[in-house]
Image: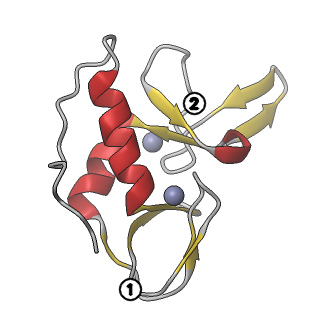
């Protein structure tokens, strides 16, 4: 998310609202949405079937009730984006992250 402050626009994680210091690993989604590494770790641990229709903050796609996802703050992330972020962080040489989701852990 973009926070508008007196100092200008600050980027922050949509899920924990931690300001981005330009150093910490973050994944950017659509419309300036951001998921930080700490929230990705939580999303992987806590992802569950959400009981209602939700719109993923990162990919902006509407997901059905019963689809796997994770909510925090006013934001939600679908499991597709969680998997993508997991892969992206694992490939990033600047980030110490081992892939947490096995490639064959298919949701459907
Ligand atoms: Zn976060
Ligand atoms: Zn998504």
The residue sitting at 34% across, 29% down in the picture is 89
> Any mark on residue 66, and which?
1
- Residue 49 placement, left or right of 97: right
> Any mark on residue 54, and which?
none
| Image coordinates for residue 87, horizontal then vertical, percent | 31, 36
Are the residues tagged 2 and 1 within 8 Å (C-beta)? no
Q: Neighbour class for label 2 at 10 Å: few (<14), some, many (≥20)?
A: some
Above/below status of 72 relative to 58: below
- Residue 58 placement, left or right of 78: right
SS label for mark 2: loop
The residue sitting at 39% across, 41% down in the picture is 85
- Which of disc 1 and disc 2 is earlier in sequence? 2
> Any mark on residue 19, and which?
2
- Residue 108 placement, left or right of 58: left
The residue sitting at 44% across, 52% down in the picture is 81
Query: Looking at the figure, which quarter contains the C terminus?
Result: bottom left
Query: Looking at the figure, which quarter contains the N terminus?
Result: top right
Q: CA distance from mark 2 to mark 1?
A: 31 Å
The residue sitting at 50% across, 83% down in the picture is 64
Q: Does the numbered disc 2 mark a residue whose Cβ is under 8 Å from ligand 1?
A: no
């Amino acid at each position: 998310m973009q926070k508008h402050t007196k100092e200008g626009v600050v980027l922050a994680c949509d899920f924990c609202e931690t300001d981005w210091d330009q150093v910490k690993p973050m994944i950017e989604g659509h419309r300036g949405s951001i998921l930080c590494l700490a929230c990705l770790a939580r999303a992987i641990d806590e992802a569950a079937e959400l009981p209602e229709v939700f719109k993923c903050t990162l990919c902006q796609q509407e997901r059905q009730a019963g689809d796997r996802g994770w909510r925090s703050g006013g934001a939600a992330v679908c499991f597709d984006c969680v998997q993508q972020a997991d892969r992206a962080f694992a490939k990033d040489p600047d980030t110490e992250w081992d892939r947490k989701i096995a490639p064959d852990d298919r949701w459907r």
